[in-house]
Amino acid sequence: MSQRRSRRRVIEGVRLEAGGLLPGETRVEDWPGGELRVVVRRPDIQLGVPIPELPIEEVEFGRGDYVPFGHGFALPASLSVEHVEEMPGIEFEIGVRDGRPRCVAIRSLEGGEPITTTLLRSGRLPAIPRVVRESVAQNAVRVVRSSEGETIGIHSLSTSELRDTFEERSADVDSAVDELERRERRWRLTDEHLAEVAAVYREALNEGRPTGKAVARKFETSEENARRWVARARTRGQETGDVDRFLPETEPRKARG
């Protein structure tokens, strides 16, 4: 997404709510992903105007393709960051996989140090979890429906209070990543978990509902993750012979979801 400031407007007579929302706007938690218009909002400093009465500055950063994560957040579909101070010439690609932000690739830019096993083992690369968290905090948007019905992205830099630090502005983004990490640790692929997946799958199958969506909704995970769990439950059924507890190798084609 282009970072060129394409449009600026000043909004008077209102106060920003937490997260940079205007009165009448609501968070969207079920946005499927796609193109978003992204804006940054904050009080507009004006000489002689008391802080409580400052108008709101809204700067449009353009449009881009975004991928949802957590409940009501999204990241650019293409996000690459370079930590120049720590290791110039090394680029980290951040993406959303299984509903969670992750580092999906590391590249050496022109003039940068080659990516070798020695480098990866040296401990000189910035810690990947920290790179991901910092990148998410700096680039995430809150998906919002405006009072006019438009779905837009409110950048994490937005704030209703001038005194807020960046950490305070993006605290909800950081909390969303924390929750996704806790959830991932919670759903270990134990036999007990796979048996629960199989039970939800069978119930949806018998009721004629999409099985992948049913598993994803039950365990609050992505449909991609749900499909992997179903496949693993099938494999476990073959390994143990216990297809009643897990799943058989195949289902009729029309029953898959």
Image (cartoon, rainbow, N blue to C red):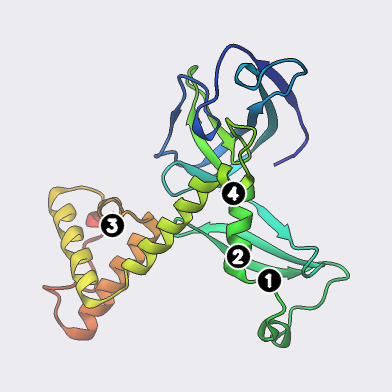
Residue 8 relative to residue 70: left or right? right
Name the residue that disc number 3 marks: 219
Looking at the rendered structure, which numbered label has been put on residue 231?
A: none
Choose mark 4 or mark 2, whichever is in front: 4
Mark sitting earlier along the chain (1/3): 1
Q: Which residue is mark 4?
A: 167
Q: Amino acid at mark 2?
A: Arg
Mark 4 to mark 2 CA distance (whole Å): 14 Å
Kind of residue sitting beneath label 1: Pro
Q: Residue at x 59, y 53 (%)?
A: 136
Instruction: Indicate the quadrant where residue 251 lies.
Output: bottom left
| Mark 1 vs 2: CB contact within 8 A | yes
| Cα distance in 3D space between marks 3 and 4 | 30 Å
Q: Mark 2 and 3 residues: CB-CB less than 8 Å, in contact? A: no
In the rendered image, residue 162, in percent from the top left (x then y), is placed at 64, 33
Name the amino acid, label 3.
Phe
- Is residue 77 at all visible to an observer of this figure? no
Q: Distance of mark 2 from mark 3, alpha carbons? A: 27 Å
Q: Which mark is residue 126?
A: 1
